[in-house]
Amino acid sequence: MHKNEPYLPISDKPFWERDQEEDDPLNDIADSCVLLQSLKQSRERWLFRTFPKFSSKSRGNKNADAVPPPHTIQTRGRCDLEVGPHIFPDTLFYEVHYLPTQASQSATANSYWHTASYSHVIPATTSQMPQAPTTVQPEAEKTSTSTPFMSSLPSVAAVTPSLISQVNTAASSNPILANLLQLAAAGKATPDQLKTLGLLIQSLANLEKTPSAIAPPSQQLDLLQPTPAQMDYYRSMPTLLPVKEFDIVIEFRETPNDRWLFPRGPVYAERKPRTNPASLNQDISLLTCLPFDNTMKTRASEPNGTETSSTPCARSPVTLTIKEAPATIWDTITRWTGGDERMNANKAYIEGLVVPPRLYLGLQLPPGPTLTQLQQACASPYTMKTLKQGPTASHTRAPRKRTNAQRKGASNSNASEGTAGTIGESIVVKRPRTSKSTTTTPIQCHSCKQTDVPLIMGGRFCRPCAERQTDSAIAPPSSTTVPAVHALPPSS
């Protein structure tokens, strides 16, 4: 139990809270919030505190709290992960391979120059290696060697193991000499560079002190045997450390910024029969034991929340189900577990674990501080409001806002009340709004006044009226022709 998590009442038998004699009645399971808080704590533990963190993304100015070693990562699939009552949808599964790292090498006297980059020796050919131990020829009688770049060097001393070792030692601390050796060995050196290299090697040979030009055969080194300098030639490459075995990394949809490592341990994996006929993938059951290490501890607490003891957790078996896992995830898991033989051994180990006694929650609580604490922990941090409001008993209209005329009338009334004191209130009478009545023209023939007939000639006349008036202009039906009356003069 985390320090900030509220106390959950537990006991060693189910429904133990009903056997206790309490004066107050027990609340129901929904109002007690014990089951809800228990599921909430369990899910947060699976998300944040069960698996070791592999990597995390940096947020703003905050650096990542977990930085993995150099690696390559490959997505193997996305499916639901089921653990007991919890389902983690769209969980990503990755396969992580670690990159090899170079062994740390000892620093030289000159920290600017790295010995491994220019740790080269003068390669010797068979012409330089006599078949039997002989005395070293005098310098005057020494012929040129068959080494590609040594044959072009002027005035080069006899190539001895001590000279080779001395040249290698000087090249490790002298970048110019090391660069000239590389160019000469590759056949890209100019005549001036070969001359400079010959002078440098000649100066190193002059520094070598020998008691005599001809040494007894017992003191000669057999060139056929590898010398320490020649052994350094093969040890100049950086040593690669053993590559770590690949791991499985998961990413929950609820924590997209964090990736979690599935630690190696006793795991038994098997495929379950297909439950969904429409799917071609099968469920994968992973049997393992928790905790993965012994760092997780349980704390016994009192009802008031005070911690009494802290003991390591006993490992107990747990089953994780990967729903409808693709073949890529199954292939990764089989290689990760080590094959059937190793998985059978892991299964025997897990089944032999001593399961700790089961504890039961008190799902119903009486009124008290524990109930209050659980209800506050389960309360939503945001105020909830239904999208569709129910019907209200009475509908009350909001008061109208006062217009500018009302405010002006009220101010005038206050002014007149201060001066005359006769007018108590100013009443503003609104003018009634007159609505303009629109007259609609009936759709009918202008001649015969018939309706519901098709009209032509701009929608004014029906067809019979239009045909009757083809030769003469159509007069309006309301107009009447009055014959002209001529007044006759009176007869005489």
Image (tube, rainbow, N blue to C red):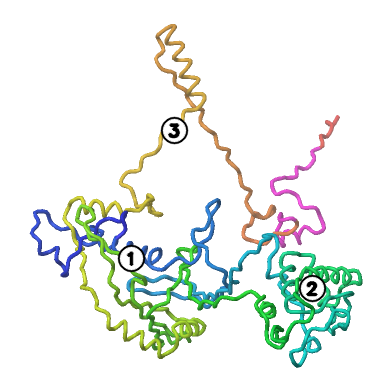
Residue at x 30%, y 54% (from the top left corner): 377
Q: Position of residue 43 (x, y in %)?
A: 36, 65
**Residue bearing mark 2:** 182
Q: Amino acid at mark 3?
A: Arg
Q: Is residue 96 visible?
A: yes
Neighbours of disc 2 within 10 Å: few (<14), some (14-19), many (20+): some
Q: Which mark is residue 296?
A: 1
Q: Position of residue 152 (x, y in %)?
A: 89, 78
Q: Earlier in the sequence, mark 3 or mark 2?
A: 2
In terms of secondary structure, where does tag 1 sit?
Answer: loop
Q: Quadrant of the C terminus?
A: top right
Is residue 205 depicted above or below 282 in this figure?
above
**Residue bearing mark 3:** 400
Residue at x 20%, y 68% (from the top left corner): 360
Please tell me which residue lies in front, 377 or 455.
Answer: 377
Q: Which residues are magenta?
A: 458-485
Q: Position of residue 181 (x, y in %)?
A: 80, 72
